[in-house]
Amino acid sequence: MKIYTLLFCIITTFSFAIAQNISGESKPQSFNVKKIIIPPILMVKEGSIKFSDENQNARLDAYENAYITFVLQNNGKGAAIALSCDISISGEVSGLNIENSQFLETIAPGKSQNVSIPIKGKENLSSGKVDVEITVKEPHGLDCDPFHVNFQTLRFQEPKIEFVDGVFSSDDGRNVLKKKIPAKLNLVVQNTGQGKTEGIAVEVISPANILALDGNRFNIGSLSPGESSSISYSFIATSQYNNENIIFKTVVKEGYGKFGSKRDFIVSINQKLETSKLVVQGEKFKETEIKKEYFASDVDRDVPQNLTYYPNKYALVIGNEDYSSKQTNLSSEVDVAFARSDANSFENYLIKTLGFEKQHVIVLNDATSGEMSREIEKLVQLGNLDGNSEIVFYYAGHGLPDDNKRPYLLPVDVSTINLESGGISLKDLYSKLASSNAAKITVFLDACFSGGGRDLGVLSARGVKIRPKEEMLTGNMIVFASSSGEERSLPFEEKKHGFFTYFLLKKLKETKGDVNYGELSEYIRNEVMKSSLIKMSMIQTPRINISSAIEDQWQKWSFR
């Protein structure tokens, strides 16, 4: 009964509440919503930009994959979202495969991301230089500063895989091919092209009744240009083989599928075979190439080019090498090794590196007394015609003293008998050059001036054994001499020059001619002394002779 009474009360109360009209009014409210942006700050980590390629030669080759990688940092307090990496390429290179844009992941504040941009050189890649500009874009314009990556490309270098040699040998020691006796076909496969290739495989196909003892397929792998590999195909001719000759068809294939080759090798039954020792042709070829390259000295290759020419500069260059064919009773041993090479190389540097006009450089090889005297007079006259002239005199050849120890340059048609009448006295030479009144006079002498018994004639080491007198200089003159006192001026066999001239040219090459006389003098002296002692076990000491007029200024002189 109590339960029914409780339910009745609850229902009555709920009905009364529904019947009531309840109303109300809330106070007006206002809201101020502000958009707050916390920016990221994007930077490329210093030193993180790298270019890497598969063969690690810092160049993109055709068919090669490479990557530009860098570390992108967010140094701001806001997250970097919706980033894209925009890439633009300049240059005339074709056949380059690189995406123009790629999306990056979100970078949280204080974090970084490693970015890698793949690049591929396609088959039609051309050789040249590529400039890649990379910019990381941020939606609000808070882009990372753009940066550039430059690299070289190389067009496809075709390999050429071929059989360069093949010899047969017999296992029975008699070097005769017999049925039922094992034999070998020894092959050399070489890459004679300019490009590397992989996946190289050789197959030897033999006729019926010729059994391959160790299989007929050989995997070589990869070969770089000039590289070779040898294989040995073992076989035996059965008693059922009835032909006189055996023809082996060889096929070599490589990874690109189009740079292999085929070749047939033929041997006869009962044929006497060559030795089983195989000479690899490729190694011999590479060795020959190295020798050819070595014919030219390093100072004679890639001579620096100066495009500025000086119309007030004049030079006379003399290389006297061949004395034996100009005089009777002289053997070739008296000739001056590499004197012509010295003179011709120095002429090359005068014109290409030091700015002398070609028509202002006179060159004499194997000059006679008359030719030397005439051209010296001409050089002096040219100097007199220009008040601001600079003249250079260079001589490589023999020098000798007279009976009073006065030094002479020796023309190829002059001997000890007529030295004083036909030789070129250094005293007279210096006097004539000084009379030109040139603003700068430079003399280079790759010769020595010691002498011995008059009956010995000219010796082969650019001089013999007496201390010559030192000639006094006048005018604005400096003389670079290759040796001192009784020393010889030695040939540098390895470099095909005299020691003195070689290091003179070497310094001009290293500095591209931009060197003062003080530095040049010190370098030549030190290098010649050291190298002559190491290479020849003899001391050669270059020296300089300076006129009193330029004692305080010659060290600052230069060719430019």
Image (tube, helix red, strand yellow):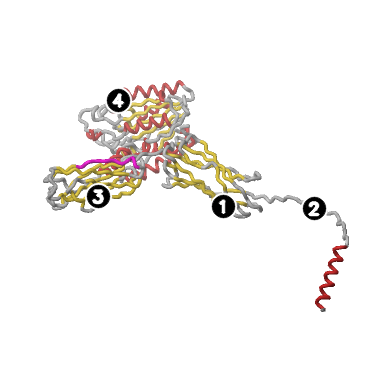
Which residue is disc 2 drawn over? Answer: 31
In contact (CB < 8 Å): disc 3 and disc 1: no
Using the image as rendered, state which of residue 409 and residue 141 is in the foreground.
141
Which comes sooner in the sequence, label 2 or label 1? 2
x and y, in percent, of residue 467 in the image: 32, 38
Q: Is 88 positioned to the left or the right of 426 in the image?
A: right
Viewer-proximal residue, 259 or 537?
A: 259
Q: Are marks 1 and 4 in contact (CB under 8 Å)?
A: no
List the residue tagged with mark 3. Answer: 216
Measured in 3D between alpha carbons, the distance from the residue under mark 3 to the one under mark 2, in whole angstroms, is 88 Å
Q: CA distance from mark 1 to mark 4?
A: 77 Å
> Could you classify mark 2 by the number of other residues whose Cα lies within 10 Å: few (under 14), some (14-19), or many (20 or more)?
few
**Image location of residue 244, percent across then percent down:** 12, 43
Q: Earlier in the sequence, mark 4 or mark 2?
A: 2
Is 17 on the left-hand or right-hand side of 387?
A: right
Residue that label 1 marks: 113
Please, is residue 114 above or below residue 11 in the view? Answer: above
What x and y, as percent, mark residue 252?
A: 29, 44
What amino acid is found at the position of numbered circle 2 in the picture?
A: Phe
Q: Which residue is mark 4?
A: 368
